[in-house]
Image (tube, rainbow, N blue to C red):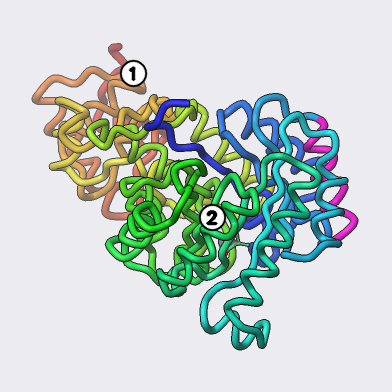
Amino acid sequence: MSNNKVQIFDTTLRDGEQVPGCKLNTQQKLVIAEQLDLLGVDIIEAGFPVSSPGDFTSVSEIAKIVKNATVCGLTRAVEKDIKVAAEALSYAKRPRIHTGIGTSESHIKYKFNSTQDKVIEKGVAAVKYAKSFVEDVEFFAEDAGRTDNEFLARVCEAMIKAGATVLNIPDTTGYCLPEEYGAKIKYLKENVKGIDNVIISCHCHNDLGLATANSIAGAINGARQIECTINGIGERAGNTSLEEVVMIMKQHPYLNLNTDIDSKLLYSTSQMVSDHMGMMVQPNKAIVGANAFAHSSGIHQDGVIKNRETYEIIDPEEVGVTESAIVLTARSGRAALAYRAKKVGYELSKLQLDDVYSEFLKFADRKKEVIDEDIHQIMKNTNVATVV
Ligand code: KIV
Ligand code: ZN
């Protein structure tokens, strides 16, 4: 594996499915898992097998059908969880157990009423037990974002010794700033013995809208796995958005970070997950939102019609969107109207365009958006015949 490859760990079916009210059944999870495999994700976190019989079945069925990706199941640092996850993953070509425990002061004090040493002991035991079932064991230090770096380094070193292959450093509460999260990864890279033999993973939540920025900061500082979800779905404000981190790495080649994702499948995958989850994608969502490649103000439209690159940093086809949209509103200019009129069959002379534009503004002031049907009506009202 190239040293610049960042593995994409998709947790749409586990952390993503924790969105309140967005339940997926096994059949839906299978369809999404197949699409994720096609998209080129490296790891599919299929669920939390001990959490319910339904989740166990989903993980087990996904493990049977996934051809390329590693299939992963989540556990707490509890023997029963690990045993059940191993069973659910038994059909996987490449199984991974993802186990771990909270490491921040508040988790140790309030969740476990325990001590740092005991938490390390529990984590080590969990990793060793998971290792008795599968070779690939990922350890998560829950709330690592608010965990003291020195203690976190001790945790990581102990987990590497116990056999962990991947160390997940979650910003569980979405608290960190990018500089802080990046510095945390750098600190671990520089202070943990054996760290170069394992993969560091970023798992960031979006409570302050920084999940994507934090994940990229982590990768810049040496992490080589990013945990993310399609459309950034997940508990509260969600997780790192897969399409965002993938396109950031693609659009900034000087970062020298790459993935195996087929970006042309991003839009269709986003739509598929949105449909199955019954959760619409916010229109202004980066990369896959309905407005991500839509232009409605006259100045922007004029620029984009002359050359797409004036206002677009990504070719929409790169992410599977057929073309940029020129949306006609009262803020649109003549260039946009002429462009859209041509698309529905009218080639307008300069004189005709002046007449048609005044009529268009009357429509546009009445409506939020002027659509193709309105254009035909405008042409009728101004006696312009179809010429294209
Ligand atoms: O956010 C988190 O800390 C998690 C872990 C269970 C990996 O989702
Ligand atoms: Zn999470």
Vertically, is 151 above or below 159? below
Asked whether residue 291 appears in the rendered view, the answer is: no
Q: Quadrant of residue 21?
A: bottom right
Q: Residues within 10 Å of mark 2 (few under 14, many from 20)?
A: many
Compute the Cα span from label 1 to label 2: 56 Å
Image position of 330 (left or right of 80): left
Vertically, is 306 above or below 280? above
Furthest toward the right, the residue is 53
Amino acid type assigned to the residue bearing label 2 in the image: Asn
Q: Label 2: which residue?
A: 168
Vertically, is 22 above or below 131? below
Image position of 5 (left or right of 109): left
N-term-proximal mark, 1 vs 2: 2
Please give the name of the residue rendered at 52% of the width and 67% of the height, measured from the top-left corner.
172
Mark sitting on residue 345: 1
In front: 96, or 371? 96
First to last magenta residue range: 52-64
Question: Is label 1 in contact with label 2 (beta carbons under 8 Å)?
Answer: no
- Asked if the residue at label 2 sits under 8 Å from ligand 1, the reply is yes
**Per the image, is 233 magenta?**
no
Q: In which quarter of the image is residue 121?
A: bottom right
In front: 223, or 384? 223
Furthest toward the left, the residue is 351
Q: In which quarter of the image is the C terminus?
A: top left
